């Protein structure tokens, strides 16, 4: 089983739509969780960390279910500029200096 | 906003040659990382570095790879004898040492390595 799994998409949605991405991770000892965004041929950029209680940042909402080892990202009111690949990322512990494990990403295309 | 920088942006080399990829992490960060991404594939961890030592390395990071912090600002990845399969985007990242907080790593723009 892959350490971090995501639906590759692509998700093609119109502007203003709400879209949800899901991710599962295999290592139950994982401690930290993130969503990164990657534009074509660019570096991953941190979108948001995912906290146990769930958290929101503007149009973006992240949820974590440790029992199911499941992470989600909800994007409301999609913009053209949201078109990118969204990477689910897991860190095995809270300590700095440990590896981030990336999913392959889910591609989102928002059209007008 | 402080950022990680990398040079060169694109490196073309012949198989068997040595290459050095350079990174300048964010100035107050203490942990440094190298990742790679082969075209069309996921980002993969190579190595992390703290206090002039390797903290963790993946099975990809074999004897042909080495890392160094030659001075107070640069962090380098050396590939001793490049293979065709080393062709990839190489990302440097850095993070603060912040106990109890999330290990938020910030990535540089990458160096695209092409091995011919």
Image (cartoon, coloured by chain):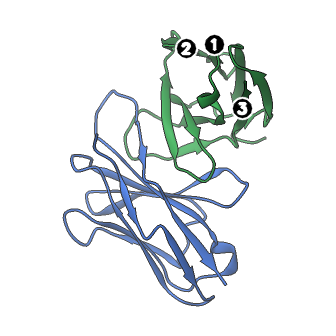
Chain colours: A green, B blue
- Looking at the picture, tell me which residue is in the foreground, B99 or B6: B6
Residue receiving disc 3: A108
Residue B22, image quadrant: bottom left
- Location of residue B10 in the rendering, given as x and y in whole percent from the top left corner: 52, 71
Residue A19, image quadrant: top right
Residue receiving disc 2: A59
Residue A55 horizontal side relative to residue A89, left or right:
left
Residue receiving disc 1: A77
Residue B86 seen in render: yes
Q: Nearer the viewer, mark 1 or mark 3?
A: 1
Mark sitting earlier along the chain (2/3): 2
Q: Please tell me how crowded label 1 is: few (under 14), some (14-19), or many (20+) other residues with Cα within 10 Å.
A: few
Q: Residue at x 57, y 72 (%)?
A: B113
Q: Are marks 2 and 3 on the same chain?
A: yes
- Location of residue A110 in the rendering, given as x and y in whole percent from the top left corner: 71, 27
Residue A28 seen in render: no
Q: Please tell me how crowded label 3 is: few (under 14), some (14-19), or many (20+) other residues with Cα within 10 Å.
A: many
Q: Are marks 1 and 3 in contact (CB under 8 Å)?
A: no
């Amino acid at each position: 089983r892959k350490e971090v799994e995501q639906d590759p998409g692509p998700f093609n949605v119109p502007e203003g739509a709400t879209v949800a991405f899901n991710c599962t991770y295999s290592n139950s000892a994982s401690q930290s969780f993130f969503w990164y965004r990657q534009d074509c041929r660019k570096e991953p950029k941190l979108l948001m960390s995912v906290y146990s209680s769930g958290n929101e940042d503007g149009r973006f909402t992240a949820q974590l279910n440790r029992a199911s080892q499941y992470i989600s990202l909800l994007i409301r009111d999609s913009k053209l500029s949201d078109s990118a690949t969204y990477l689910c990322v897991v860190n095995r512990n809270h300590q700095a200096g440990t590896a981030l494990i990336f999913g392959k990403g889910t591609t989102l295309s928002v059209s007008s | 906003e402080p950022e990680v920088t990398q040079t060169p942006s694109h490196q073309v080399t012949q198989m068997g040659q040595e290459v050095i990829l350079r990174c300048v992490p964010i100035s107050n960060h203490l942990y440094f990382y190298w990742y790679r991404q082969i075209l069309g594939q996921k980002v993969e961890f190579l190595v992390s570095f703290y206090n002039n030592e390797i903290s963790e390395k993946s099975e990809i990071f074999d004897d042909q790879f080495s890392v160094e912090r030659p001075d107070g600002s640069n962090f380098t990845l050396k590939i001793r004898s490049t293979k065709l399969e080393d062709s990839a985007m190489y990302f440097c990242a850095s993070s603060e040492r912040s106990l109890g907080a999330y290990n938020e790593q910030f990535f540089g723009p990458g160096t695209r390595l092409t091995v011919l």
